[in-house]
Amino acid sequence: MAQRDDDEYEPVFKKSTWGTNRYVYNPNNPVGIVLIILSVVFALVMMFLMKEGKGPFEPPKETPWSPPINDSPAYPWDGEHRATPSGGTTPTPRPTT
């Protein structure tokens, strides 16, 4: 049903008939029906991607420990028990100026 009697103009959006002040796509307008179809297709594709865990919903890939402990012997926890560089258990006092 056209809004105006003088032409066949149908708006892309029309007020909702459910008593709210929202606007909805107008299926009587060709652009409105295309927007309805695209919205449904978009929602279905997003739901499929969520279910399958793909695209932006793909979990992050696990990265190995960087650097691996066995590759760098500079760490004190690599299996060798060495003394600390200071050699003592008490901290050295700071020099006063």
Image: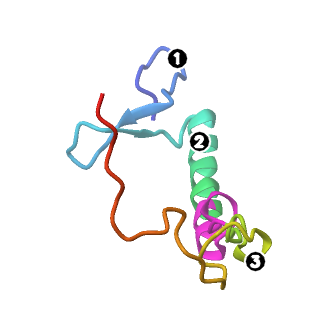
Between 20 and 65, the residue placed more toward the observer is 65
- Judge whether 82 appears above or below 27 on screen: below
- Residue sitting at x 52%, y 22%: 9
User: Label 1: which residue?
Assistant: 7
Q: Residue at x 34, y 38 (%)?
A: 95
Vertical relation: 13 (above or below) 88: above
Residues in magenta, as a range? 46-60
Disc with the residue nearer the chain's start (3 vs 1): 1
- Crowding around mark 2 (Cα neighbors within 10 Å: few <14, some 14 to 19, many 20+) is some
Q: Residue at 54% across / 39% down in the picture? A: 28
Camera-side mark, 3 or 2 = 3
Q: Nearer the viewer, residue 73 or 42?
A: 73
Specify the amino acid type for callout 3: Asn
SS at badge 2: helix
Residue bearing the label numbered 2:
35
Rendered location of residue 67, percent (x, y): 71, 65
Return the residue at label 3. Answer: 70
